[in-house]
Amino acid sequence: MELKSLIDKTNIPQHIAIIMDGNGRWAKQQGEDRIFGHHEGVNSVREIVEACGEIGVKFLTLYAFSTENWNRPKDEVNALMELLVATISLETPNLHKQGVKLHTIGDIESLPESCQKELQESISITKDNTRVNLILALSYSSKWEIMNAVKKIAIQVESGTIKVKDVNNTLMDKMLTTSKFPDPELMIRTSGEHRISNFLLWQLAYAEFYFTDTLWPDFRKDDFFKAILAYQKRERRFGLTGEQIQN
Ligand code: FPP
């Protein structure tokens, strides 16, 4: 039976965040260069975005490049940036046709100008779409984001715009780069690693985590549907007891 048909359409996570891991290992297994794995990873990105549209996931955040990834060998960083520019340019018409709206989070100004330009163009072309919000985390790290939010709040307190007693979760939410999006209900990490790697530390406070050994270039629609089916079996408690949730 088709996995997609087993999904309960009344319990679809509205926001899914993914750590796309394992491109390098996948390439090595094929006897290829690491960048070959990143190229193949783009095909998985395309399928998962499509799958979100098919089942009604409204927000998809992909960890495409972390702050720490800048420390990779120069050749790999350059190749990843070129791949990003080429992919955005090539895929934008298709994304637009599918009703996908592109967003970014992260230190976008640290990206090469060509990259920033391509992203801006795609964001502008897709700005009125509403079917799926695709959020690319680029040059992103959660500690960087939280630190910036704390600094913004400190400046407002110092200038007297707000008082210390006004600092609460809602204000923190507003100061984060994700302020326009709901928190993810599900976080998926591929490749068998069980780490959060500086990704959405604040926003994932109550998310369900799903780990799979599948490497990102092999992670396709059915793997994604499997993750959603696993999510639908979880009992989300938010700190309450099982009995409280049942009642
Ligand atoms: C992690 O695998 C993957 C990345 C650091 C880059 C992810 C990029 C893509 C999937 C392609 C471009 C994406 C978009 C959205 C256009 P890894 O290199 O750490 O793999 P390894 O752990 O096996 O070495």
Image (cartoon, helix red, strand yellow):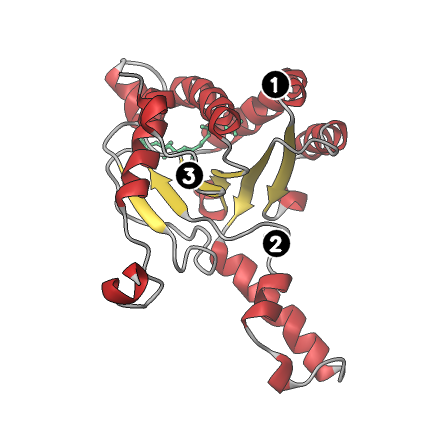
The answer to which of marks 3 and 2 sits earlier in the sequence is: 3
Q: Circle 3: is it few (<14), some (14-19), or many (20+) Cα within 10 Å? A: many
Q: Which residue is mark 3?
A: 18
Does any atom of ligand 1 lie closer than 8 Å to the CB of label 3? no
Q: Secondary structure at mark 1?
A: helix
Compare residues 190 and 220 and report the one nearer the observer: 220
- Residue drawn at x 45%, y 47% is 68
Residue 233 lies left or right of residue 83; in this view the side is left
The answer to which of marks 1 and 3 sits earlier in the sequence is: 3
Quarter of the rendered structure image containing ligand 1: top left
Which quadrant would residue 156 be assigned to in this image?
bottom right
The answer to which of marks 2 and 1 sits earlier in the sequence is: 1
Is 16 rendered above or below residue 41? below
Q: Circle 1: is it few (<14), some (14-19), or many (20+) Cα within 10 Å? A: some
Task: Identify the amino acid type marked 2.
Answer: Thr
Q: Which residue is mark 1?
A: 91
Q: CA distance from mark 2 to mark 1?
A: 24 Å
Q: Quadrant of the N terminus?
A: top left
Q: CA distance from mark 1 to mark 3?
A: 19 Å
- Residue 6 shows in this picture: yes
Q: Which residue is mark 2?
A: 177
